[in-house]
Image: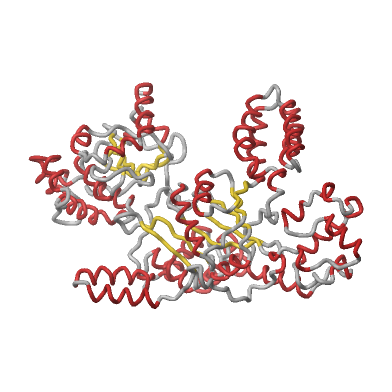
Amino acid sequence: MTTDEKQHVADLAKRHVAPRNILLSLQDKFPENVTRITQVYKHKSVIEKEIRGPRSEIQHLFKLIEDAGYVYWSRKQDDSEVVREIFWAHPDSVKLLNIFPIVLVMDSTYKTNKYRQPLFEIVGMTSTELTFVVGFAYMESEQTENFCWVLEKLKELFVKKDMSPQVILTDRDLALMKAIEVVFPNSINLLCRFHINKNVGAKCKQHVVNDLQKTIDTLWMEVVWASDEVEYGQRLHQLEQACVDYSGFINYVKDTWLTPHRHRFVGAWINRVLHLAMNNNLRLQLGNIRASFQKSFYEVEHAHVSPFYGYLRGSVSRAALRRIAEELLRVDYVGTNRQICGCTLRTSYGLPCACELGRYRVGGIPIPIDVVHVHWRKLTMEVELEIGEDDGSEVDMTAAMDELWRQFRSLDVIGKRALRSRVCELAYPTMTTLCPPPEKIKTKGGVKKKGKKPTDYDVYRDPSYHESYIEDVVNVESDGNCGFRVIASLHGYGEDGWSMVRRELGLELIDKDRSTLYDKLFSNRLSAVRESLMIESFGSQPPEKWMSLPDMGYLIANRYNVVLVCLGNPCITFFPMTSSHSPNVSIYCIGFVNHNHWVHVNMKEGFPLPPVTLDWKKFRSHIATTWMLGFAGRMQHWQLLTPVLA
């Protein structure tokens, strides 16, 4: 590309234009241009690297977050600098959350990023029925403990300590639902009907003949929208009668959804909850929200010019006025009868229902402003968030800073360095030593198509049950350091961090707290194990310096407190030998290929684990027994399948 063409690409890239559209724009502006899409991607990558400069990925992320004034938290894996979770929220989003805290929607994207980490998104709704993103979090995994950490950070965004969402809408993610119970015990957790109906529809197609699918789908929707418990019972009975020959489907519907969760999504129950009817659109700009507030102030729809709305015009949102106008159409039928009315608009939206409107009409008075829930009366973001005086939510740090100085002055030199390091992490986030988690999928050149698997790979060539659990094999450079390169990559150091792994395993071997363990474990081989970790140059290494198991397996599991799984001949699992079981532990899976090379193996979640060594059982501490108990199911799965497929 010419200089002008490169500048054009740079200008469009800064505006987040998609590469394919950049290419089209190039061809329109420069008719003689013969650039291909790959060149656009490459130049875009060059631009991004120039912007990032010498900063690491995490340092650059924190710089962008700091520059934009985001509120954020992060935490790292135990005994490492690898990021575990990051949560961030825009300051305007924090303000909107505190103004409109009633309903939140929570959901995770699929693991489509290169670290295969779910992106968790939290969304709220304004009085004008527009949605806004409250915050995002990258999470290590979708376990209850991870969700609890994120929700605790969300909780810290509320200015007042006693404030919490009244309703949280999710899909049927049991771990997230459990975390909501723990962190927000007073919130009502509703389930998204869209996801439920999609799952039920798929199950209907699986079990029911084509001619009846539409009928059963209609009956199911009538169950979901039943207005009271009596109607619910009647509609469910009709559905059961229609499915008398399809027990698989009706059992799924009842066991998975209705019996445990009907109070979370069926109209008969959720119509009693103030949920403001969240829609499914999850991304709208703050500018649109501000514009919608202005419209509610200054623009009056024809249907609302009547004196009946006199107290409400300019004081409540147009969305609320539209719902009231629609409800007013029911007054001729309902009158002032509460039983006929059902009062759904009052209980679900906090707006006057038909029987209330009937009473105002009979009395000849306009609708009072105080009968509209305060949510619909909030029409600005330009408010100061009030801090609670007696609820422990004060923000003064004078006492805390004085205590830090007191501690600092009382410490010795080593203690002062340690405390200074911790304070600097807060004061200088763009200089952080944190690193991203290891890349768990290859974005290019992976083993994907059947028949394209490397013939030299033992993990593929030898008929073995674990082959069906392999998703991908990631290669590293073959220079005698390959085993340490794989561990460095898995641990977040990057493949070139292999020398750091060698050094850390050497330090592990002489750790005073575990020296007795290694004296017993390696016995007269201790010096040979130590020598294998020491190298004279950074080039290719001779066979005696290669990573070998089981020796290095014990050191890796202990040093990094991970579960190490080796697939090869034999297949072995290494648990830490001095710590207790952790449900969120990282599992590093490696493969020995071609009898002389180590690779990183991506496995499907929950894959069975091979047995541990006899020496692990012999020399591990008592508390380490919990590792085998924690993974008993996956190890039994291995034992059941191996004889069948061997």
Up the image or down, 467 lies above or below 42; here it is above
Residue 29: image x %, image y %? Answer: 61, 70
For image coordinates 24% across by 71% down, the residue present is 417
Residue pictured at 72% horizontal, 68% vertical: 377
Q: Can residue 593 be seen in this view?
A: no
- Rendering quarter of residue 460: top left
Q: How is the image coloured?
A: secondary structure
What is the tally of numbered marks visible in this picture?
0
Instruction: State which quarter of the image contains the C terminus.
Output: top left
Name the residue nearer the viewer: 565 or 494.
565
- The residue nearer to you, when weighing 335 against 263, is 335
Image check: 104 left or right of 618? right
**Picture layout, residue 265 above or below residue 391:** above
Front one among 388 and 195 = 388
User: Residue lying farthest left?
Assistant: 524
Residue 557 position within the rendered picture, expressed as x and y whole percent measured from the top left: 26, 45
Q: In this view, does 130 lie to the left or right of 603?
A: right
Any part of residue 29 in sight? yes
Q: Note whether 130 is above or below 582 in the view shown.
A: below
Give the answer, above or below, for where 408 lies relative to 27. Answer: below
Q: Residue at the front extreme?
A: 390
User: Does residue 195 appear left or right of residue 541 in this picture?
Assistant: right
The x, y position of residue 341, in whole percent, is 83, 50
Residue 316 position by quadrant: bottom right
Where is residue 77? Give x, y as percent: 35, 54
